[in-house]
Amino acid sequence: MDEELENIRLQKLNQIARNLNNPIPHGVITIGSIEKFNEIVNRYLHQLIIVEFFAQWCGPCKSFKPIYESLQPLYEQKGVVFLRIDSEAFPEICTQFNVMGVPAFLFIKEKKGIHRVSGAMLKNQFQNLVDSLLGKFFSES
């Protein structure tokens, strides 16, 4: 039991050290260029990056935006980076990650899509999904 607690303590200290050297951005970042997208994916390599793909004309996208923005501060403390990408402005990113429609959500770790969801979600569904992915892919970080 003591060894397990020590391992957890060391994991948390490592996470804190990583975050001090590379603080998680405040707020949702709306991507304005492919270079910015690549910079963020490379910079936050070991963090969970959530990308919301949207379109200006998409009603469900507009409805989900305030929910997405309200969840960002809750997950910032857990090291999660929130991005938004206009799918029509950056179709090459959509193609790269096989995003076919909006709204769509891509979860990235170490430059790879670890999970993808298409379609609108309720706030609690989205939170459950994020919590599940954090538990599955980041419990040992």
Image: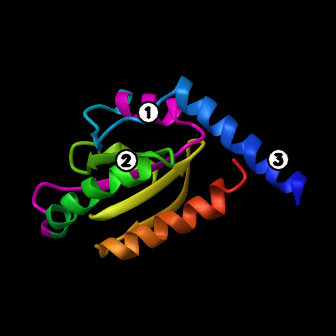
Q: Residues within 10 Å of mark 2 (few under 14, many from 20)?
A: many
User: The residue under label 3 is which amino acid type?
Assistant: Glu
| Residue extent of the magenta highlight | 36-59
Disc 1, SS: helix
Q: Residue at x 47, y 69 (%)?
A: 129
Residue on which the image places disc 1 = 40
Residue 82 circle label:
2
Q: Which mark is residue 88?
A: none
Q: Secondary structure at mark 3?
A: helix
Q: Is residue 120 above or below residue 46?
A: below
Tally of numbered tags: 3
Residue 119 visible in rendering: no
Tell me the CA gap for discs 1 and 3: 32 Å
Task: From the image, state whether disc 1 or disc 2 is nearer to you.
Answer: 2
Q: Does residue 89 sit above or below 134 in this rendering?
A: above
Q: Where in the figure is residue 57, as x and y percent of width and height?
A: 10, 60
